[in-house]
Image (cartoon, coloured by chain):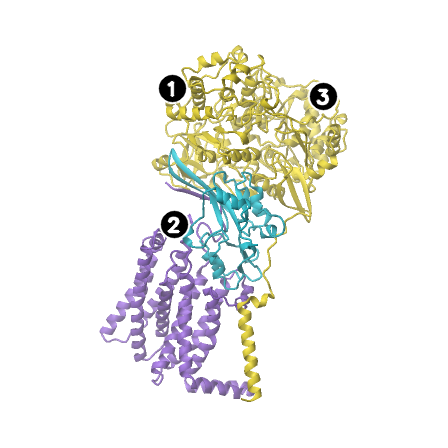
Chain colours: A yellow, B purple, C cyan
Amino acid sequence: MRRREFIKISSYGIAGATLLGGVTTNWFDLYGDQLPDPGTDGDRVVPTFCEICFWKCGILAHVKDGRVTKITGNPKDPLSQGHLCPRGTGGTGLLYDPDRLTQPLLRVDKRGSQEFEAVSWDAALNEVAENFERIKARYGAGALALFSHGYGGSWIKHLFKAYGCGNIAAPSYAQCRGPREVGFDLTYGWTVGSPERTDLRNSRCIVLVGSHLGENMHNTQVQDFAHALRNGADLIVLDPRFSTAASKANHWLPVKPGSDLAILLAWMNVLIEEDLYDRDYIERYAYGFDQLKEHVKSYTPEWAYPRTGIEPDLIRRTARMMGASRPATLVHPGRHVTWYGNDTQRSRAIAILNALLGSWGRKGGLYIPAQVNLPPYEYPSYGAADHRPDRANPSDFPLADEALAQGIRDATVPDIPGDERIRGWMVYGSNLPASLPNPEQTYKALQELDFLAVVDVLPVEMVGWADVVLPEATYLERCDEPFAPAYREPFVSIRQEVVPPLGESKPGWWIARELGHRLGLNEFFPWKDAMEYGESRLEAAGLSCEHIREEGVVRAERQPIYFEDGAVPEFYTDSGKIELYSQKLGALGFDPMPAFHDDEIEDPPPGYFRLLYGRAPMHSFTRTTNNRLLSEMMDENAVWVNATIAKEWGLEDGERIRLKNQDGVVSTYTAPVRVTERIRPDCVYIVHGYGHTARGLHFAKGRGISDSELITRYTVDPIMGGTGMNVNFVTFVRAGEVAENGATGADAAVAEEVAS
Amino acid sequence: MNEFTTTRHNPLIDPTMHVWHGEVAGYLFLGGVVAGIMVLMGAWLLMRSDEDRSEHLSLVPWTAPILLSIGMLLLWLDLENRFNAFRFYFVFRPLSPMSWGSWILLAIYPASLMLAWYTTPDVLRRKALDWIGGRIPTAVGRLQRVDAWILGHRTSIAWVNVLAGAALGVYTGLLLGTMASRPLWNSAVLGPLFLTSGLSTGAAYMLLYRLEDVERVLLTRVDMGLIVIELALVAIWLIGMATGGELTHEAMTLLVSGPYSPAFWSLVVGFGLVVPLLGDWIEQAQGHVPGRLAAFMVLVGGFALRWIIVYAGQHTGFSEGMAALF
Amino acid sequence: MSEKRYAMAVDTRTCVGCTACVLACKTENAVAEGYSRDWITTAVSGSFPNLQMSIHSERCNHCENPPCVHVCPTGASYIGPGGIVLVDHDKCTGCKACIAACPYDARFVDPRTGTIDKCTFCVHRVENGVPTTACQDVCPTRSIFFGDINDPDSEISRVLRERDHYVLHPEAGTRPRHYFLK
């Protein structure tokens, strides 16, 4: 063989082997595999606290190249403990929501037309101040009112008090927690508060009355709930719907809506009759046991059965389960309790059950919270507040200790005598058409107002009614009051600016101060900014501002939170004891102990179903349904219909329907049917917060059904004025059927035209 | 009642997977036809090389690389990151049928081009050489050596085409057939089924050209035999799925009595297999020279088979999405 | 010292299906809009009022016998450190064979790059000194466990010893390394 040939063959051979070797071994790792790195860690990480809901979890906001990439929990914060719920995690969806309000706006067409023009802050603030002054001059400061919901509203509340107006309300009272606070206050002389003073994490038996923890996503509550379950706690759930919590329960009681009180009374009966209550605790701390014992004698499980649909055996078994774990048995007070109008009494019953189980002030029950004493800022005295007593703080509800939001609304409508009528509203962070029952009345009031100013971050329905819209910066773009709640351990956390405000949006403190200056209230706004304000309070409490700014949180020394550790058992009731029997209620003509009234329970009219509403873990009222990030998890609600009912009606899973209520109101939009075994046949369920009609919410508009527009009827709690809203009944309006308002049940587009 | 919810709604994945569409179905069809051309022509060269061939039959192999290029274009268009396609040729991964396929596709070109050159009538070959020689005189010598080499290696070229064609025909079936995640595909029968279908559509495709009667009769007989085998394989495939557990049984119902059944029974089995078979058989019995109708039907049926397998197969899986289809 | 083998376990007793894990993953990993690398499923059985519901937080199972790796023609899909199944975007052609091969439908096409995306067990964290995945970090019910199962003292090893557990679709034969605690 010639040399040339040899070289040729060898070189081909080597080249071939190289090639073959290369292709089977990734080219000798010359282009090794790269590890992916999304690069979302911030070059700046700013601690602050969240405001997607009202829990105020401590968070860490990561900022990279001026943009917030992600939000994680602040491990130092006692509420979040470094873990977040989905809503807080999705906070960037609010920060970067393209529909955010970024300019002050002035109305240019008739009220409610949602037509505005962008103006300067000066123009907007002057408009607000002029109108306030005009109304005050003519009618007095009591003709103004403030609806404020959200932590940043504190500045505006301060402004109103300085201005001499006492009509300050939030829907969180009479439309949410109010009955619970009054019920517990009447029993223990303490309210439950927020964050709730529940020692869930140490409970050995948890009883949820309608509460759907796990879908209701108050972070710490759910963390503690999981902790208790992991440690083997028993769980009893009372709910017409098989909630997530019910799916984890030892016993699920699918109670007939409206009849919960009967179960609670039957439980009292069993606990007392079978001697399962904390005898020692009752003897030491309670008043009225003998009256209670007598009172519940007739409320046997057999008595409860036909009223509730729950078998007597199950009632007894669950009562025994509760008794077995006392005093670490917690009957959870719930949070949103404005259901049927007897809600204060139902909350009283829950409070009484906890007392019988000896859980108040005990580990695994309800603890005695502690708080850092942050001295208030030294303002001049506010002076006397002018409020319209009869509507906003009505005398027919003497036990209401906060203003009633619907009261203020009802004091605004034309049939109120002129000099008593409320003329001007300011609304901060509250979407009243969605929170107040009987929307017609709300619209009436809105039309009647002389002036309406709205402060918000998103153009929700409330904003569309305003005369002046003031865009607030989101919680990630502003400083607010330091937060020092009453909690199992005392701490202070701060909210500070993570990124500068978008567009022309401004923080609440700035809005309040600017208005204050225009209203001659300079002495009430002596600080330069919220940071200076906060620093002075923190310093007065002996805390280091620099430290807290770095960490986000500073914890103070723990106090005993259980009686057995030294917490003082004091009850601020008239008797100084836990009042199983309430003298105060009796004196006012109410049942001194909760009593079940058969006539209070309504059955749905034939062909109708009780409308129940609730929470989804990735959403928070109407404020998150435009959040595109959160909406990737859930972008519309569904109507939960019992499978047997669906079959009777021929409803298919996923079929789009409207709902029509007992007053003939038809939902503007459609939602899909969810055929499920997870609900009783006599009710339907939808998640609250959908069905937006506001034009500015480009994502949320038209999605899902609004429960608020169907809540035209409500029953008023006679004790404190709470509005029971689970008293509406709906039927199905299918595609092709003509509805009352003329809209066919065809598709959303048609209804949209009809509605607008 | 079984209620199932998921928060996942990834495009192309939910509610059932649908990542491969007409491009892949089209390639599978064209690849099958090319496989058929190569195997059948390769076999022809091995067994009947000394016989006369019609001009069309002689030139048909040139369409193989053309069809394959269209198929590969379709595949390239299906890629979501198509400008990375060269990466297929940086490695060879023995466990990946798709890697086998990328290299097989590459090998098809030289194989089919040599085949086409070989079968091209002398006159045309000389004309082509002269034409190129006129343009690029320096290449003439080399080209003539190549021409001579090809003509001298009939057997090797034929075998290479038979094997490469068979590999092309079978690997796509293996690719789908080895996916345990898709119950409709997951069968050892899919490989042979695709090969048989490929050969059958290859024969049918060749029958579309203007062939001699004797060629038509032979190709049709071959096709009939292939159709019979294909029917048997389809039956085995369906029986295998019916008896293979809940998931594969559900997958089979998708095809046999579910949303894909009208297309499956009418286009694939009826129009594509049974009717042309019967038609051919009757024609043969009556001594007619088979026309193009049956061939056309076989092609339609072959394409429908690939289309349905690609689409229906993606609906099947372990997830709950399949239930929504019924 | 034995090689690391990462695995994850989700406690179905405490998981409430809140989707915090999904959102945390999206923001940590800058996942494409409209897509998620992990997800929540619920399954209800029975009839009113005798019902049972299971909730799963699911994602790529980082199988020991991963069909997605076997089927990948370019080697883009590979087994990385600690057994984490990864995708090298430089090599991915977007042929989607791996998507078809996955019995769990855990993969998807990232529309921004045309390459394949999926859960990475936050490899950029866990191989860089931060021992938790984003989903594990956020989970309010502490239902997610993650770590090295070749280390008998790791939390995940402990929890797998103490609790009954299962994997999804073991019949697919992929030997997943994502467990669910009963």
B320 left or right of B130 in image: left
Q: Chain of mark 2?
A: B
Given the image, on which type of amino acid does mark 3 rest? Tyr
Can residue B119 be seen?
Answer: no
Marks 1 & 3 on one chain: yes
Indicate the quadrant where residue B58 lies: bottom left
Q: Position of residue B47 (x, y in %)?
A: 34, 81
What chain is tagged by disc 3?
A
Q: Mark 1 — residue?
A: A303
Q: Which mark is residue A382?
A: 3
Q: CA distance from mark 2 to mark 3?
A: 68 Å
| Mark 2, secondary structure of its residue | helix
Instruction: Name which residue type carries label 1.
Output: Trp
Three-letter code, disc 2: Leu
The residue that label 2 is drawn on is B325
Q: Secondary structure at mark 1?
A: helix
Q: Nearer the viewer, residue C95 or B139?
A: C95
Point out residue A550 in the picture as x, y percentages from the top left corner: 71, 39
Report the side of A179 relative to A383 (left or right): left
Are discs 2 and 1 located on one and the same chain? Answer: no
* A752 relative to B135, above or below: above
- Name the chain under label 1: A
Residue C43 image offset from top left, x and y in percent:
42, 42
Q: Few, some or many C-alpha atoms within 10 Å of disc 1 (few <14, some 14-19, many ≥20)?
A: some
Q: Identify the image quadrant of the N terminus of chain B.
A: top left
**Mark 2 Cα-neighbour bin, 10 Å: few <14, some 14–19, many ≥20:** few
Whether label 2 touches label 1, CB < 8 Å: no
